[in-house]
Image (spheres, rainbow, N blue to C red):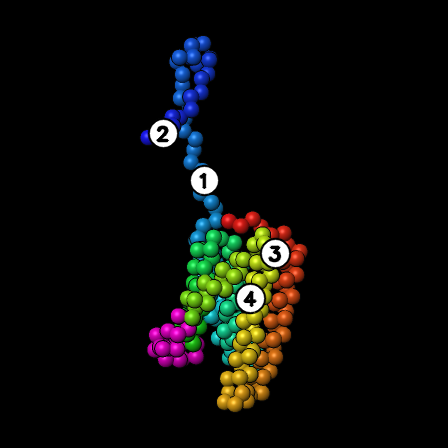
Amino acid sequence: MWLEVSTPIIVDMNETDGDPSRSVAAPHSAAAPLPSHTIAHPLVGAILGGVLLGLSDLLAQNTLPYPWANLANSAAVWALGAFVIGAWSRGRLRSTAAAGMVLLLVAVETYYIAAVAFLHDSVTALWSETTALWLVLAVFVGQIFAVAGSLIHSRRPGIRFAAAGFAGSIFIVEAIARLTRSPGGNSSGHEIHTALIEIALAVVVWLVLLAATLTRRARPES
Protein backbone atom coordinates (compact mmCIF):
# COMPACT_ATOMS: atom_id res chain seq x y z
CA MET A 1 0.00 0.00 0.00
CA TRP A 2 1.36 3.41 -0.96
CA LEU A 3 0.74 6.43 1.23
CA GLU A 4 0.69 9.69 -0.68
CA VAL A 5 1.32 12.87 1.24
CA SER A 6 0.27 16.07 -0.46
CA THR A 7 1.62 19.55 0.08
CA PRO A 8 -0.46 21.53 2.59
CA ILE A 9 -2.86 24.03 1.07
CA ILE A 10 -3.15 27.54 2.45
CA VAL A 11 -6.22 29.47 1.53
CA ASP A 12 -6.17 33.26 1.55
CA MET A 13 -9.76 34.51 1.31
CA ASN A 14 -8.57 37.84 -0.05
CA GLU A 15 -6.68 36.27 -2.93
CA THR A 16 -9.56 33.89 -3.79
CA ASP A 17 -12.23 36.55 -3.65
CA GLY A 18 -13.96 34.75 -0.81
CA ASP A 19 -14.17 31.47 -2.73
CA PRO A 20 -12.30 28.75 -0.79
CA SER A 21 -12.42 26.46 -3.82
CA ARG A 22 -9.87 28.72 -5.52
CA SER A 23 -7.08 27.65 -3.23
CA VAL A 24 -3.46 28.65 -3.58
CA ALA A 25 -0.81 26.07 -2.83
CA ALA A 26 1.79 27.12 -0.32
CA PRO A 27 5.29 27.32 -1.75
CA HIS A 28 7.71 24.58 -0.72
CA SER A 29 9.73 25.60 2.31
CA ALA A 30 13.37 26.36 1.69
CA ALA A 31 15.82 23.56 2.29
CA ALA A 32 17.45 23.58 5.70
CA PRO A 33 20.89 25.21 5.57
CA LEU A 34 23.88 22.93 5.78
CA PRO A 35 25.71 22.93 9.09
CA SER A 36 28.42 25.55 9.18
CA HIS A 37 30.80 23.05 10.72
CA THR A 38 31.93 20.64 8.00
CA ILE A 39 34.82 18.25 7.67
CA ALA A 40 36.84 21.01 5.96
CA HIS A 41 37.15 22.94 9.23
CA PRO A 42 38.96 20.30 11.33
CA LEU A 43 41.04 19.17 8.35
CA VAL A 44 42.36 22.69 7.73
CA GLY A 45 43.29 22.97 11.39
CA ALA A 46 44.89 19.51 11.25
CA ILE A 47 47.06 20.43 8.26
CA LEU A 48 48.25 23.65 9.85
CA GLY A 49 48.76 21.94 13.19
CA GLY A 50 50.70 19.12 11.52
CA VAL A 51 53.09 21.55 9.86
CA LEU A 52 53.61 23.36 13.16
CA LEU A 53 54.11 20.09 15.07
CA GLY A 54 56.64 18.72 12.59
CA LEU A 55 58.68 21.93 12.43
CA SER A 56 58.65 22.60 16.17
CA ASP A 57 59.61 18.99 16.91
CA LEU A 58 62.69 19.16 14.68
CA LEU A 59 63.65 22.57 16.04
CA ALA A 60 63.29 21.56 19.68
CA GLN A 61 65.10 18.27 19.15
CA ASN A 62 68.13 20.06 17.75
CA THR A 63 68.23 23.05 20.10
CA LEU A 64 67.12 21.84 23.53
CA PRO A 65 69.56 20.15 25.90
CA TYR A 66 68.99 16.59 27.05
CA PRO A 67 66.77 15.23 28.53
CA TRP A 68 64.40 17.82 27.05
CA ALA A 69 65.50 16.97 23.52
CA ASN A 70 64.22 13.43 24.09
CA LEU A 71 60.88 14.82 25.16
CA ALA A 72 60.66 16.96 22.02
CA ASN A 73 60.76 13.80 19.90
CA SER A 74 58.40 11.88 22.16
CA ALA A 75 55.68 9.80 20.53
CA ALA A 76 53.49 10.63 23.53
CA VAL A 77 53.69 14.34 22.70
CA TRP A 78 52.57 13.61 19.14
CA ALA A 79 49.70 11.46 20.38
CA LEU A 80 48.65 14.26 22.72
CA GLY A 81 48.60 16.55 19.68
CA ALA A 82 46.01 14.27 18.06
CA PHE A 83 44.03 14.29 21.31
CA VAL A 84 44.03 18.10 21.31
CA ILE A 85 42.89 18.35 17.69
CA GLY A 86 40.06 15.94 18.49
CA ALA A 87 38.97 17.99 21.49
CA TRP A 88 39.20 21.19 19.46
CA SER A 89 37.45 20.05 16.28
CA ARG A 90 34.10 19.25 17.98
CA GLY A 91 32.95 17.49 14.83
CA ARG A 92 31.40 14.12 14.15
CA LEU A 93 33.51 11.10 14.94
CA ARG A 94 34.40 10.48 11.29
CA SER A 95 35.70 13.99 10.67
CA THR A 96 37.43 14.04 14.06
CA ALA A 97 39.24 10.77 13.36
CA ALA A 98 40.27 12.05 9.93
CA ALA A 99 41.62 15.25 11.48
CA GLY A 100 43.78 13.32 13.95
CA MET A 101 45.14 11.10 11.21
CA VAL A 102 45.91 14.04 8.90
CA LEU A 103 47.58 15.96 11.72
CA LEU A 104 50.12 13.22 12.36
CA LEU A 105 50.65 12.30 8.71
CA VAL A 106 51.43 15.91 7.87
CA ALA A 107 53.63 16.23 10.96
CA VAL A 108 55.71 13.19 10.00
CA GLU A 109 56.35 14.35 6.44
CA THR A 110 56.94 17.95 7.55
CA TYR A 111 59.56 16.71 10.02
CA TYR A 112 61.49 14.80 7.36
CA ILE A 113 61.10 17.49 4.70
CA ALA A 114 62.46 20.06 7.15
CA ALA A 115 65.33 17.73 8.02
CA VAL A 116 66.22 17.47 4.33
CA ALA A 117 65.90 21.22 3.79
CA PHE A 118 67.66 22.52 6.91
CA LEU A 119 69.85 19.68 8.15
CA HIS A 120 70.78 18.38 4.69
CA ASP A 121 69.55 14.87 5.44
CA SER A 122 69.21 12.49 2.52
CA VAL A 123 66.02 12.93 0.50
CA THR A 124 65.51 9.18 0.72
CA ALA A 125 64.39 9.77 4.31
CA LEU A 126 61.04 10.86 2.90
CA TRP A 127 60.22 7.27 1.88
CA SER A 128 62.50 5.20 4.09
CA GLU A 129 61.27 2.24 6.13
CA THR A 130 61.45 4.32 9.29
CA THR A 131 59.28 7.02 7.75
CA ALA A 132 56.82 4.41 6.49
CA LEU A 133 56.56 2.97 10.00
CA TRP A 134 55.84 6.41 11.46
CA LEU A 135 53.21 7.03 8.78
CA VAL A 136 51.45 3.76 9.57
CA LEU A 137 51.49 4.61 13.28
CA ALA A 138 50.15 8.08 12.45
CA VAL A 139 47.10 6.55 10.78
CA PHE A 140 46.12 4.49 13.81
CA VAL A 141 47.34 6.65 16.68
CA GLY A 142 45.98 9.83 15.10
CA GLN A 143 42.47 8.44 14.78
CA ILE A 144 42.37 6.78 18.20
CA PHE A 145 43.59 9.78 20.15
CA ALA A 146 41.52 12.29 18.18
CA VAL A 147 38.35 10.34 18.93
CA ALA A 148 39.41 10.11 22.58
CA GLY A 149 39.86 13.88 22.58
CA SER A 150 36.36 14.41 21.23
CA LEU A 151 34.96 12.32 24.09
CA ILE A 152 36.15 14.92 26.58
CA HIS A 153 32.91 16.76 25.64
CA SER A 154 30.63 13.79 26.29
CA ARG A 155 27.50 14.29 28.36
CA ARG A 156 28.45 11.26 30.45
CA PRO A 157 30.90 12.06 33.27
CA GLY A 158 32.37 8.57 33.18
CA ILE A 159 33.33 8.91 29.51
CA ARG A 160 34.87 12.33 30.12
CA PHE A 161 36.96 10.98 33.00
CA ALA A 162 38.05 8.00 30.90
CA ALA A 163 39.10 10.29 28.05
CA ALA A 164 41.11 12.44 30.45
CA GLY A 165 42.83 9.38 31.87
CA PHE A 166 43.60 8.07 28.38
CA ALA A 167 45.37 11.29 27.42
CA GLY A 168 47.79 11.14 30.33
CA SER A 169 48.36 7.40 30.29
CA ILE A 170 50.38 7.52 27.06
CA PHE A 171 53.12 9.39 28.92
CA ILE A 172 53.19 6.68 31.61
CA VAL A 173 53.45 3.97 28.95
CA GLU A 174 56.34 5.72 27.24
CA ALA A 175 58.07 6.40 30.56
CA ILE A 176 57.95 2.68 31.39
CA ALA A 177 59.32 1.87 27.94
CA ARG A 178 62.23 4.25 28.47
CA LEU A 179 63.06 2.66 31.82
CA THR A 180 63.03 -0.89 30.44
CA ARG A 181 64.22 -0.58 26.83
CA SER A 182 67.91 -1.13 27.56
CA PRO A 183 69.23 -4.70 28.04
CA GLY A 184 68.68 -5.71 31.63
CA GLY A 185 66.50 -2.65 32.16
CA ASN A 186 69.52 -0.40 32.65
CA SER A 187 68.55 2.89 31.00
CA SER A 188 70.89 5.83 30.53
CA GLY A 189 70.70 8.87 32.77
CA HIS A 190 69.01 10.90 30.02
CA GLU A 191 66.37 8.21 29.54
CA ILE A 192 65.64 8.06 33.26
CA HIS A 193 65.34 11.84 33.49
CA THR A 194 63.06 11.91 30.43
CA ALA A 195 60.89 9.20 31.98
CA LEU A 196 60.54 11.21 35.19
CA ILE A 197 59.55 14.28 33.19
CA GLU A 198 56.95 12.24 31.32
CA ILE A 199 55.46 10.92 34.54
CA ALA A 200 55.19 14.51 35.78
CA LEU A 201 53.57 15.53 32.49
CA ALA A 202 51.05 12.70 32.82
CA VAL A 203 50.01 14.02 36.23
CA VAL A 204 49.70 17.56 34.86
CA VAL A 205 47.59 16.39 31.91
CA TRP A 206 45.34 14.39 34.22
CA LEU A 207 44.84 17.28 36.62
CA VAL A 208 44.11 19.80 33.87
CA LEU A 209 41.64 17.58 32.01
CA LEU A 210 39.93 16.28 35.13
CA ALA A 211 39.49 19.84 36.38
CA ALA A 212 38.05 20.78 33.00
CA THR A 213 35.56 17.91 33.07
CA LEU A 214 34.37 18.98 36.51
CA THR A 215 33.96 22.66 35.73
CA ARG A 216 32.93 22.71 32.07
CA ARG A 217 29.38 22.03 31.07
CA ALA A 218 29.35 19.07 28.71
CA ARG A 219 27.96 19.85 25.27
CA PRO A 220 25.22 17.62 23.78
CA GLU A 221 26.61 14.76 21.76
CA SER A 222 26.19 15.06 18.00
Per the image, is 32 magenta? no
Magenta stretch bounds: 116-136
User: At 58% across and 80% down in the image, what residue appears?
Assistant: 194
What residue would you read off at disc 3?
A: 157
Q: Residues within 10 Å of mark 2 (few under 14, many from 20)?
A: few
Marked residue nearer the N-terminal end (2 or 1):
2
**Which comes sooner in the sequence, label 3 or label 1?**
1
Separation of marks 3 and 1 at Cα, in angstroms: 32 Å
Q: Earlier in the sequence, mark 4 or mark 3?
A: 3
Q: Are marks 2 and 1 in contact (CB under 8 Å)?
A: no
Q: Secondary structure at mark 2?
A: loop
The amino acid on which the numbered mark 4 sits, given as a three-letter code, is: Phe
Res 34 → quadrant: top left
Q: Check contact, mark 1 vs mark 4: CB within 8 A.
A: no
Query: Which mark sits nearer the N-terminus, 2 or 3?
Result: 2
SS for callout 3: helix
The disc placed on residue 33 is: 1
Measuring from the top left, give residue 70's x and y in whole percent: 53, 79
- Does the rendering let one see residue 7? yes
Give residue 3's mark.
Answer: 2
Neighbor class of circle 3 (other Cα within 10 Å; few <14, some 14-19, many 20+) is some
Q: Mark 2 or mark 3: which is in front? A: 2
